[in-house]
Image (spheres, grey):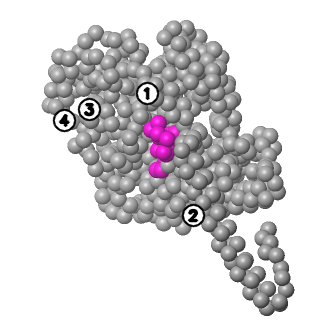
Amino acid sequence: MIAKVILLSLCLASCSASTGSSLRAGRMEGSGRVVETEEVEASLRESLDAVLRGAKGNTAKQLQTIEASIWQTYQALPKNGLGRLGHRAVRYLVHNYFAREHGWLINGLEPHGNRDDVSEMHELSILQDKAPALVESLLEVQRGDHGLLLADTVAMVAALERLIFDESLTSLHAAYSLNNLTTIQTVNESSLHEVLSSYLLLFEMGEKAGLHDTLAHQKIKHRAAQIGGNWPFLIDFEQDAVMNYDFAQKQQANPFVAKSYTFQEAAEITEGLASGYGKWQNLECSQMKADLMDLYPDGKGLVPVSKFYSQPDHAAYHFSESMEYLRTIGALDENLPGEPRVRIANYMIGPSNCIASSTYYSVCCLNECESLMNELEAKVRKPAEEPGQLLDFVSNMSSSTVDGHRELSQALMRRLHDIASRHGGQVQLHSRLFAQWMHHVFPNECPYPEMSDDVTVLTPSHWLDKKQQTSVPKEQREHLVAKAERSSSQANSEITWSEEDVLHAILPARPARSTSASLLRLVSQLAMLLGLLRVAVGSWQSIAGAHSAMTGKKQANHLPF
C-alpha cells in the first residue's frame, strides 16, 4: 500500500516546532546576508524534498524517528556563528548515526582516522550518482558557511537513508528474476520467502553476487541450506520481518482470502530487512568479542598475539588476520615492552568484520563507543565540559563489559584534567584526546584513536584485492605464536598515551600569516596603489591640457577626487 507522502516543507516545520529550532535565516551583517542565507536554505530544502518525495511510507514518522536519535548529539556539537552545525560537525553526526543505528559504513563517509583533512558530505558517491542537485546545494551551504539547523540535518540523514533503501531495490528486482518471477505479479507467502532469502543472499555476497545467473544462484542457495551455519538464522530473520509486516497490516487484510504480496509490499519488507540487518548480525559480533575477551580475560581490551593466533581447531572463530593488516588499521599495540597485543575494540570495527553489501556502503559490527558517546552527549548537551563533571558522568556509565558506579583510577583522573588544561579548563568531547581517554575507561568498547595516514585503509574496499596481506595460513600463525611467546614478558600496567590532538567536529584554524609576510603584502599593495594613482593623474592632466587648448580658458589642475 502506498501511503500518502507529507511534503518535506511541512515535515521540516513540524520538526522545527518540536525542537525549538528556527527555520528562518539569521540576520547578520545587513539584509544581503539574510537574502543569501534564505536562498541557500530554500535550495537545500528543495533538493532534499526531491529525494524524499518519492518515498513510500510515512515520511513524517521517519523524520521523527531520526530526530529522536540525533538531537542530543546535535545539541552537544559545536555550532558556527549562525548557531548551526558546520559541515565538519554534520559529517561527524551523519557518520555517527549510520554507524550506531545500522552498522553502515557509507563510501565517502569513512572513519575520520583522526585526521584534519577528511571527506565532505558532498563527496559521497551515492549523492553524486543519485542526487547531483543535492550535492550542489551542499556545496553552496559550505561555501557560505551557512551550516545546518536540526531540521535540515534530520532531512539530510533521511535523504541518505532513502537513497540507500532505494538502491537496495536493484537486488530485490534480481531476487525476483532469480526465482523465475516478475515484479508485476503478486506472489504467495512461500514464493515471497524464496524471494527474500535470495535478496539476503545477494545482500551478504555484495558486489560478488551474480544478479543474472539463475542456475548458479539456486545452487549457492541450496548449498547454503545444506551446510547450515548461519543460514537458518538468516531465514529466521527474514521470516520474522514478514510476520512483523503482516501484523502491522492486519487491519487492512482480508482474513478470508489467501495472503499474497505485491512487489511494492515486498519492497517495504525489504526496507525493514536492510534497516535492521546491521543490528541483527551484530549478535555474531558480540559473540566474537566475547571469545576474544576469553582468550585473555584481564579486562584491558588487549589480547597477546600468541593467544590471538592459537585457537584450537574446534573453536567457533579462527582469527587469521595478518600482523600487517592489524597494524595498518590500528588494532595492534606495539608501544609497550613484550609481545604485540591486539586491541579488541579496534579489531571488532575493522574492515575484515564488514560485509560488502552494496556499491555505496558496507555493513560492519556496531561501534559500541558511539552509543556510549551518545549517552554522554545526552548528559552534557554542549561541546565541552569541566573534567570534574565528566568524571561524575562517566564513572556512573556502564557498558556490555563494564559496570557503572565505579571508582576511576587516579591516573585516568589526572589524564582528564591534563586534557582540560589544553583547552581552557574544559574537555572537548569530540576530540582525539578524549577518545583516547574513553578507550582506557571502556577498553573493550572504545577503539584506540590511532592517527591514520590514509583513512581508506579503514574501509573494506581497500582490502578486497589484498587477501595475501590480510590473512596468514595456519603454519605461519604457528610460527608467529612461537616467536611471540619467546618475546613475551609480564603484563605492564602502563597505558599507551599520545599527546596529539584533533578536534573532530571543528575545522582546523588557518595558520596566521607572519608579521614579515603581512608587512611585505602591505608594501606591495601600497606600491600598486601609488602606481595606479600616477597613471590616473597623468591621464587626467593630459585630458585637462587638451581641453584648455580647445577652450582658450585658464583652468587650475585639480585632482578629480
Q: Position of residue 365 (x, y in %)?
A: 44, 36
Prevalent SS, magenta region: loop
Say which label, 4 or 1, has the lower sequence index.
Answer: 1
The tag earlier along the polypeptide, 2 or 3, is: 2
Where is mark 1, residue-wise?
Answer: 448
* Spot occupied by residue 31 in the image (x, y as percentages of width and height): 82, 57
Residue placed at 35% from the left, 47% from the top? 462
Which residue is label 3 attached to? 323
Give the residue at x 68% y 75%.
538
Q: What's the residue at 79%, 49% (across, down)? A: 28
- Give left or right: position of 96 versus 229: right
Which residue is label 4 attached to?
Answer: 473
Q: Residues within 10 Å of mark 3 (few under 14, many from 20)?
A: some
Mark 2 highlights which residue? 132
Which element is circle 1 on?
loop
Asked if disc 4 and disc 1 are in contact, CB closer than 8 Å, the reply is no
- Binning the other alpha carbons within 10 Å of mark 4 as few (below 14), some (14 to 19) or many (20 upward) gives few
Residue at mark 4 to residue at mark 1: CA–CA distance: 27 Å
Q: Secondary structure at mark 3?
A: helix
Q: Determine whether 303 is above or below 162 in the image.
A: above
Distance from Cα at disc 3 to Cα at disc 4: 12 Å
Magenta segment:
97-118
- Disc 2 residue type (three-letter): Pro
Does residue 29 sit above or below 435 in this rendering? below
- Name the amino acid type tagged 3: Met
Instruction: Tally the numbered discs.
Output: 4
Q: x, y percentage for residue 329?
A: 36, 36
Disc 4 marks a residue whose amino acid type is Pro
| Residue 474: in magenta span | no
From the viewer's perspective, is the residue at label 3 or at label 4 nearer?
3
What distance separates the C-alpha of mark 2 from that of mark 1? 36 Å
Report whether 67 appears left or right of 231: right
